[in-house]
Image (cartoon, grey):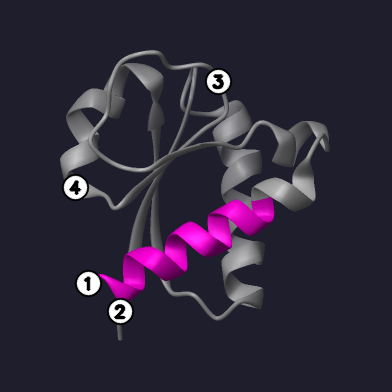
Amino acid sequence: MKEVKVLIACGSGIATSTVAQEKVKEILKEEKIHAKITKGTVGQVQYLQDDVDLILLTTKYNKPLNKPVISVFGLISGINEEQIKKEIIKTCREIIENK
């Protein structure tokens, strides 16, 4: 079974990434997309990106990355939440198709 490896990162690696992680789990479960989710801090993103397929951030990050990146703060704030859900689903399906 194909699985998407997801990194969810926030400033501290604890607060908003935990909330986002639970929302992302729900979204992917509803869509029957299998994922392994890892949490971290934005400071770790550069080093952890090689071990994942997709990076979800709850805060701004301006350094270049070699994996798809989606800002998911809207899952916490409720702003553009539906659009973010669609983007996560679309990106995860594309990753699975290309594996």
How many angstroms separate mark 2 from mark 1 (CA)? Answer: 8 Å
At label 1, the amino acid type is: Lys
Q: Which of marks 4 and 3 is nearer the N terminus?
A: 4
**Residue 6: percent from left, percent from top:** 38, 51
How many angstroms separate mark 4 from mark 2 (CA)? Answer: 15 Å
Residue 98 in sight in this render: yes
CB contact under 8 Å: marks 2 and 1: yes
Question: Mark 4 falls on what kind of element?
Answer: helix
Q: Residue extending furthest bottom?
A: 1
Which SS does the magenta portion mostly show?
helix
- Tell me if mark 4 has few (under 14), some (14-19) or many (20+) residues whose alpha carbon lies within 10 angstroms of its own: few
**Residue 36: percent from left, percent from top:** 37, 62
Q: Earlier in the sequence, mark 2 or mark 1?
A: 2
Q: Which residue is drawn at 23% across and 25% down?
A: 46
Name the foreground residue: 43 vs 70. 70
**Residue 23: percent from left, percent from top:** 67, 53
Question: Mark 3 falls on what kind of element?
Answer: loop
- Tell me if mark 1 has few (under 14), some (14-19) or many (20+) residues whose alpha carbon lies within 10 angstroms of its own: few
Q: Which residue is drawn at 38% across and 32% down?
A: 40
The residue labelled by disc 3 is 59
Q: Which mark, by number, is residue 52?
A: none
CB contact under 8 Å: marks 1 and 3: no
- Tell me if mark 3 has few (under 14), some (14-19) or many (20+) residues whose alpha carbon lies within 10 angstroms of its own: some
The residue labelled by disc 2 is 2
Vertical placement of residue 78 versus 29, above or below: above
The residue labelled by disc 1 is 99
Q: Work out which quarter of the rendered image holds the C terminus and state it.
A: bottom left
The residue labelled by disc 4 is 51
Nearer the observer: mark 2 or 1; the answer is 1
Q: Give the range drawn in magenta.
A: 85-99
**Residue 79: percent from left, percent from top:** 82, 34
Q: Earlier in the sequence, mark 4 or mark 2?
A: 2
